Amino acid sequence: MKQLLAEHRRVSLALAGVLFVLLLVTISNIVAGLPDPRQPAPDFFDNPDPTSWALRDESNEVLTAFAERPLFSATRRIKVRPPGPRAEPKPEPAAPVLTLDKWSLLGIFDSGEVEGALIRHPNSGRHRLVVGERVDGWELTSVDPRSVRFKSVAGGSQAELNMALATVKVLPVPSVKGGTAGAATSNVEQRPKAAEAAEAAEAPEIITPSFGDFYGGPAEKRD
């Protein structure tokens, strides 16, 4: 108990000493008074000299020279690399053009906007195809005046159909039979044989065009 009282007394004396020192400092400041104010420098309120901050001619010259200086040196040249060897693509071998078995080209139509062809197969009959349409695994790709081209849908092979040309058959001139000669006039019977031979030589040959069986053959065969 005595130790606590002694400790409390020491703390109280220390605080009292600190307060006493502060009191002495305060009294000293009051008695001594405030320090004399300091006056500003005499040139503080003077106008600044314009020459002290104005740009000099030398600075203008430096700025002008810097602005007019070229971006690159006059001796600079563009370095162009020589072109390297250009590898030319190898031409792809052209695929062989096939022919469509048993198909025949009957006709071609082109209206300026739509073009196509008429084709025929012995089993499936006639087909009217426009460019881009398919039949039997083949797509019509192009139309020419006398041929058409197809492309295989499966493998990309090319095939071509050509227009069939008419074949000319020469028919023999029918010979004059006995019955016909008997019905002729006496003047015809009395003509010389040489004149009859010349007349027969000058007689025109009868020519009939035929397309074979491209259009289905003659009417009697189609029936």
Image: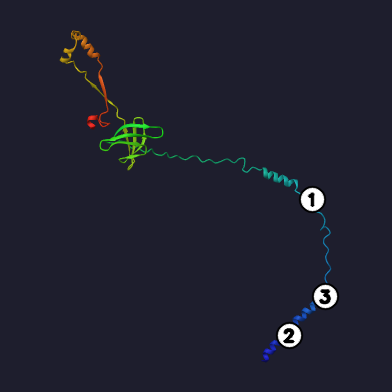
Specify the quadrant of the image occupied by residue 207.
top left
Name the colouring of the figure: rainbow
Specify the quadrant of the image occupied by residue 217.
top left
Q: CA distance from mark 1 to mark 2?
A: 67 Å
Amino acid bearing label 1: Pro
Mark 1 / mark 2, whichever is N-terminal: 2
Mark 1 / mark 3, whichever is N-terminal: 3
Q: Which is in the foreground here, disc 1 or disc 3?
A: 3
Q: Which is in the foreground here, disc 3 or disc 2?
A: 3
Q: How many other residues sit within 10 Å of disc 2, few (<14), some (14-19) or many (≥20)?
A: few
Helix, strand or loop at mark 2: helix
| Residue 47 higher or lower than 57, as above or below | below
Asked if marks 1 and 3 touch (Cβ < 8 Å), the reply is: no
Asked if marks 3 and 2 touch (Cβ < 8 Å), the reply is: no
| Residue 193 higher or lower than 161, as above or below | above
Question: Residue placed at 80% from the left, 79% from the top?
Answer: 24
Helix, strand or loop at mark 1: helix
Residue tagged by mark 1? 50
Left or right: residue 72 versus residue 135 is right
Question: Residue placed at 25% from the left, 20% from the top?
Answer: 206
Helix, strand or loop at mark 3: helix
Residue tagged by mark 2? 13
Amino acid bearing label 2: Leu
Quadrant in which the N terminus is drawn: bottom right
Residue tagged by mark 3? 30
Mark 3 / mark 2, whichever is N-terminal: 2
- Along the line of sight, which residue is nearer the eye, 114 or 154? 114
